[in-house]
Amino acid sequence: MLLQDIAYLDETMEVKEHQDIRIQDTCIHEIANHGCLSPYPKEECLSGKGLLVMPGLCDAHMHTGQQLLKGCVLDASGMIWKDIMLPFESTLTDEIMQLNAELAALEMIRNGTTSFLDAGSYHMDAAAKIYAQSGLRAQLTCSTMDDASLPIQIQDDVESALTKNDAFYDTWHQKGNLKVSYSLRTLLSVSERLIKEIHAHAKARNALLQVHMNEYEQEVHAVIAKYGMRPYTYLDQLKILDERFVGAHSLIVDEEEISLMQKHHTHVVLCPFSNSAKALAPYPTLKKQGLLLALGSDGSAHGGLSLWNEMRQLRCMIHVTHGIANHDRHILSAKELLHMAITNGTALMQEKNLGCIKPGYLADLIFLNIHQPHLYPSGNLTNTLVECVEGHDVLHSMVNGKWLMKDHKILTLDEKAIFQKAVAFQRKS
């Protein structure tokens, strides 16, 4: 495939214009100034007129099992995951989970997301089947808890939780574009033995360990009351923290915890719209410590799966607080946000040569229609990507050099049939 006379976003998040890009098999093969690459016989050629190609976005923290909860949490109070999320997830079936995954896949593709980390739910085999069909690149996991007070439908003990996770890993890891990680839902819903065992099983497989961390004030206080120390300090005592640890949220952290995160090279995923109802992460300190900060939606129940929206939310939140307080108008630039949504997220996919447009890198790409009144002309197109782009501006999408969407038509899933199922679900609800 030859992309001709196209603009693309390079590894520094600068736009290069009038370029030709050749894609062969799954990878970007070569890049040259326009006119320097000749088409091969019978090669597919795509004109770049009015298009910007960039690496696909990575949603580093989402919940497939909550896709059908749109509109249910915005004005809710308390610990939403315990009061709303878990009761809903305990009612899931294979059929409902399949619909969750179908709708999530459609929403991500249409919003320019080509890879994602699912933080765990139930009936994940049903979700994995859909994601394998969708062509998206994914890190999937099972929700893991052994709290005896949970609804009977989702109760596990240590042995059953390990069996479930290992079976899911054996079935789906490295199947197509899917990988499998391990998870602990929250420190308040797992025993110390389960924490140690899940970490050991993940380490033996070099798999990521995803954990919801320091998300609510009452959660942090409860961990201190239970273990006599803060969440990250407790996990450090258990020797759980390492470079495979992904701490979603990590909002209410103190200096000691941040030092431990830096010492063990753990990763943080910020979910701005969801987080805005809970707390504000100490972004300047996390950034200063050199932590890998990725961006997530926290699932469709928290405002949809658009990382374009999440970038804008985070910029506003950080500038109106830390930026103003520190008299720093450049505290979070457009380039930094794009790195969070692309480079830092794809670094968690455990895949070589991903998240950049360079020869030898995987062709996980999205194509934006930039010749539109709300995007063009622009004095700085990198800034305009963050300020103005919406999901509907994504015209084409591909993973591994294969089209997921072309000319706004999704090619890997039957969008019309899926929406009919969604309408039927709405009527029953």
Image (cartoon, grey):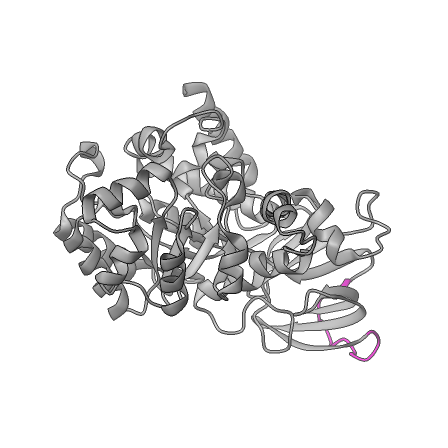
Residue 36 among magenta residues: yes
Name the residue located 53 percent from the left edge and 39 percent from the top edge. Answer: 273
Front residue of this view, candidates 192 and 320: 320
Q: Where 386 falls versus 4 (above or below)?
A: above
Residue 120 drawn at (x, y percent): 34, 47
The quarter of the rendered structure image containing the N terminus is bottom right
The residue drawn where x is 24% and y is 70% is: 204
Left or right, 393 with reference to 339:
right
Considering the whole magenta stretch, tell me its main secondary structure: loop
Question: Is there any visible trace of residue 336 in the rendered image?
Answer: yes
Describe residue 148's horizontal placement relative to residue 340 as left or right: left
Q: Is residue 224 magenta?
A: no
Residue at 55% across, 47% down: 108
Viewer-nearest residue: 225 or 395: 225
Residue 355 place in picture, x, y as percent = 57, 66
Q: Which residues are magenta?
A: 34-47
Return the x and y of residue 266 as percentages of the image width and height: 39, 63
